[in-house]
Image (spheres, rainbow, N blue to C red):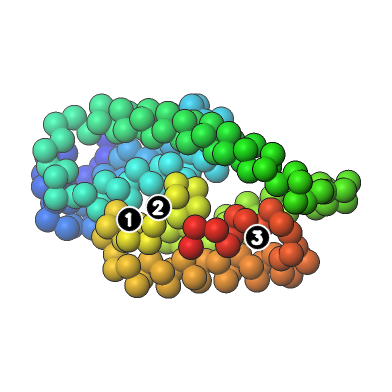
Amino acid sequence: MSSGSDYNENDLLHRIAEGDEHAFTELYNRYWKKVYTYLLRMTKSHEIAEELLYDIFTKLWTGRELIAEIRNMDSFLSKVAYNKAISFFRYTASQRKMQALVAKQMEGLYVEDTADKLLNSEARELLHEAIRQLSPQRKLVFTLSREQGLTHEQIARQLNLSTQTVKKTMSNALSAIREFLHKRGLEGSLLLYFYLETRK
């Protein structure tokens, strides 16, 4: 794959391992389209493919000290993309089972009428829209917390950030989402309450 760079891949990886952000950008430019296309073919969703692509390269950067040990980046990224997509499918399946269980347990506590059901359908769409408008860092921290169930400490270790930074970023993300939903009159939705207020 041609890059138009003076660096061969081995030099590029060693520069990245030393913390060279320009070299990492070059690596990203070489491979992002191929990885994204593969993920899109697997997930059938532009949004999911973008999220997984971002996660792959974020983790590649945070673990850059070992990147020079990769002998075939093309093959490595193909395998990582495949594993990431499979993990996403497994996680989604487990979440659906959990959501079904929670819904069943709540039947005796909360009865939705037709208007409530329509509201939750609308709320879910607006929630996704609110998440999409977050900055990349807020979106990543929010996704790791709410979608993958990681604690603030786990997120901090994974992203090489301080726990305080993660907490602040998460707080800002929640505030931005609540403000977005508040303007649309949906901050009181039960669905949103459980999604935003749990696993702090």
The percent coordinates of residue 167 (x first, y second) are 41, 69
The percent coordinates of residue 120 (x first, y second) are 75, 50
Q: Are marks 3 and 2 in contact (CB under 8 Å)?
A: no
Q: Amino acid at mark 1?
A: Gln
Q: Which mark is residue 150?
A: 2
Q: Secondary structure at mark 3?
A: helix
Q: Which mark is residue 154?
A: 1
Q: Amino acid at mark 2?
A: Leu
Which of 62 and 111 lies nearest the eye of the viewer? 111
Does the image show residue 185?
yes
The percent coordinates of residue 45 (x first, y second) are 56, 35
Quarter occupied by residue 174: bottom right
Q: Amino acid at mark 3?
A: Tyr
Q: Is residue 109 left or right of residue 174?
A: right
Distance from label 3 to label 2 (Cα)?
19 Å
Which of 26 and 88 lies nearest the eye of the viewer? 88
Quarter occupied by residue 159: bottom left
Q: Which residue is mark 3?
A: 193
Q: Residue furthest right?
A: 114
The mark that comes first in sequence, 3 or 2, is 2
Q: Is residue 81 above or below residue 162?
A: above
The percent coordinates of residue 91 (x first, y second) are 48, 36
| Residue found at x 78% / y 66% | 185
